[in-house]
Amino acid sequence: YLKKQKSFNRKVGHMTLLDSTMQNLEDRYNILKGESMQTRLYIERKDEHQIESQALIQEIKQVLNINISNLRYFVIYDIKGLSNEALDKTLYTVFAEKNKDSIHFDLPLNNLYIAYEYLPGQYDQRADSALQCLQLLVKDSQADIKTGTLIMFEENISSDALEKIKDLLINNVESREK
């Protein structure tokens, strides 16, 4: 074991560092230089897999008695401290499924949208799961992930109806508008 471990060591000045420690230092240096990847991903299910958006349309109709026929449902990932290479490696293994999802890096927002996220300190299972997967796939990952939800309405609805939908979706105890 010790022979294998020594072969993975690098000498830096008078110090001997493990490769993982060296990579960690390089990542921190890149963050200080501003080379750290800070990305926002918008993940949308493809048409035939839009279960969440169809369920939300039905809930809005039944609970609020607001007649809408179409909306777009996105999961938002705010990712900090992940290199371009690591993001490319994990894009379709951690954040999306190739056959079910469309990934958008930029999204033109109209006036009719609701975006919300968990409050700081609230447990975010989606972000935690993504971080755990990332740590398995990317050695010594120092990434930070936050998630949210974006609902875009593709038809005109009144501001009163929009407020009612916000009240339905955003529980002020655990989440806030993004």
Image (spheres, rainbow, N blue to C red):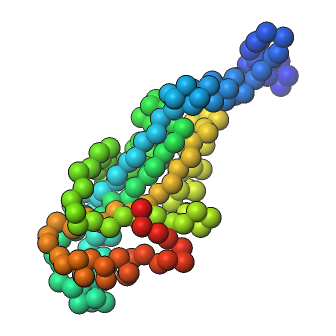
Toward the top, the furthest residue is 13
Tally the marks. Answer: 0
Asked if one can make out residue 4 in the rendered structure from this viewpoint, the answer is no
Residue 174 falls left or right of residue 78: right
**Picture coordinates of residue 147, whole percent (x, y):** 47, 57
16 over 34 or under it: above or below: above
What residue is drawn where x is 59% and y is 29%? 32
Where on the picture, by quarter, is residue 167?
A: bottom left
Image quadrant occupied by the N terminus: top right
Query: Where does the image place residue 110, in percent across and percent down from the top left?
Result: 21, 59
Name the spot of residue 145 as percent of width and height, x first: 53, 50
Q: Identify whether 36 is placed above or below 96.
A: above
The residue lying at 21 percent from left, 85 percent from top is 66
The percent coordinates of residue 83 (x first, y second) are: 49, 32
Q: Is residue 172 visible?
A: yes
Q: Give 17 or 97, whichever is nearer the viewer.
A: 17
Closest to the observer, 6 or 80:
80
Residue, far front: 159
Residue in the image at 31% along x and 89% along y? 63
The quarter of the displayed image where residue 143 is located? top right
Residue 106 appears left or right of 84: left
Q: Name the image quarter holding the C terminus.
A: bottom left
Does residue 96 sit above or below 173 in this rendering? above
